Image (tube, rainbow, N blue to C red):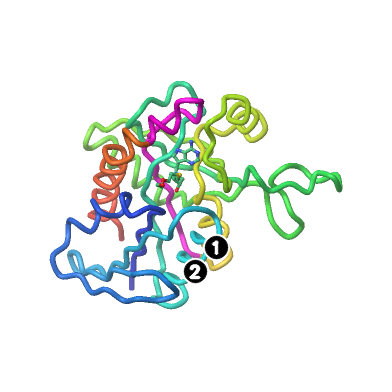
Amino acid sequence: MLKLAIMGAMQEEIEPLIANFSDVKVTEFANNKYYEVNFNGIDIVIAYSKIGKVFASLTATTMIEKFGCNKLLFSGVAGAINPSLKIGDLIVATKLCQHDLDITAFGHPYGYVPGGAVYIESDKELIELANEVSNDLNIKLTEGIIATGDQFVANEERKNWIGNTFKADALEMEGASVAVVCNALDVPFLILRSISDSADMDAGFSFDEFLKSSALRSAEFIMEVVKRVK
Ligand code: 3QA
């Protein structure tokens, strides 16, 4: 039986999701709040993790191991690397990597540690479902590589390095850690992001200006995925 996890990193990213539901049960665990709802007969747990890979791993693990979620959707915003991605555009991750993971001193590639992999692939069926939503509702959706690290990137040079090293199209601070957790626990996942900035010197201002509107776009799209998920 399906039990769906929907997560964001920041409150602003899950607020427009919670707004869709009237009967919400709140459970506190590990310094965080988990919002349980039922939608069209599907049990859903919603939470925002707080920013960064560590908090995101904790929340993803909690949703799976404590709440019993067996499918996970992430909704939020991202910085664009690929110049064809504009503010508000939606990207779904085909695969994700950690751009700040570096044991290259031992001859390993960036993003790799023994026992792991540079890239973790998202669930193909969920990507297919996202593409169906995109086609049916005529909402542009780009498939691409998302790079994750514990840095708010507001620097053209760093952005380009991440783009070139990982062939990444967008960057954020949680996706790949959620992917590692879901992959290890055998839970299909989808990471969806709407662009809030271009990870350049104006990124801070752009992020503040577009966080809410882009988070809303991502949340609205995720709700359409939720309506079709099996
Ligand atoms: C940034 C958020 C974090 O959860 C990652 C947004 C959008 N643009 C990015 C960029 N670099 C890295 N990540 C992103 N999210 C948190 S910092 C602002 C916090 O304000 C994706 C993302 N360029 C808190 C108020 O003080």
Q: Quadrant of residue 166?
A: top right
List the single residue furthest toward the right.
106
Q: Quadrant of the C terminus?
A: bottom left
Question: Is 175 on the left-hand or right-hand side of 224?
Answer: right
| Picture quadrant where residue 62 is located | bottom left
Q: Secondary structure at mark 2?
A: helix
At x 35% / y 76%, what residue is drawn? Answer: 28
- The image quadrant in which ligand 1 is located: top left
Mark 2 or mark 1: whose residue is earlier in sequence: 2
Q: Indicate if the residue with disc 2 has its beta carbon within 8 Å of ligand 1.
A: no
The N terminus: image quadrant:
bottom left
Looking at numbered disc 1 in the image, what kind of residue is underneath it?
A: Val
Crowd band around label 1 with a 10 angstrom C-alpha radius: few (<14), some (14–19), many (20+): some
The tag on residue 128 is none
Q: Is residue 47 magenta?
A: no
Q: In this rendered view, identify the residue nearer to me: 79 or 95.
A: 79
Instruction: In the rendered view, tell whether residue 141 sits above or below residue 84.
Output: below
CA gap, disc 2 to disc 1? 6 Å
Q: Please tell me how crowded label 2 is: few (under 14), some (14-19), or many (20+) other residues with Cα within 10 Å.
A: some
Name the residue carrying label 1: 181
On the image, the x and y values in percent for residue 172 come to 49, 42
Residue at the spot x=55%, y=51% of the render? 176
Image x and y of residue 57, in percent: 52, 62
Residue range corresponding to the magenta coloring: 187-207
- Viewer-proximal residue among 63 and 117: 63
Q: Is residue 162 above or below residue 187?
A: above
Q: Are marks 2 and 1 in contact (CB under 8 Å)?
A: yes
- Residue 194 image offset from top left, x and y in percent: 36, 38
Q: Residue at x 29, y 67 (%)?
A: 44
Provide the residue designation for mark 2.
61
What's the amino acid at mark 2? Thr
Q: Is residue 181 left or right of residue 30?
A: right
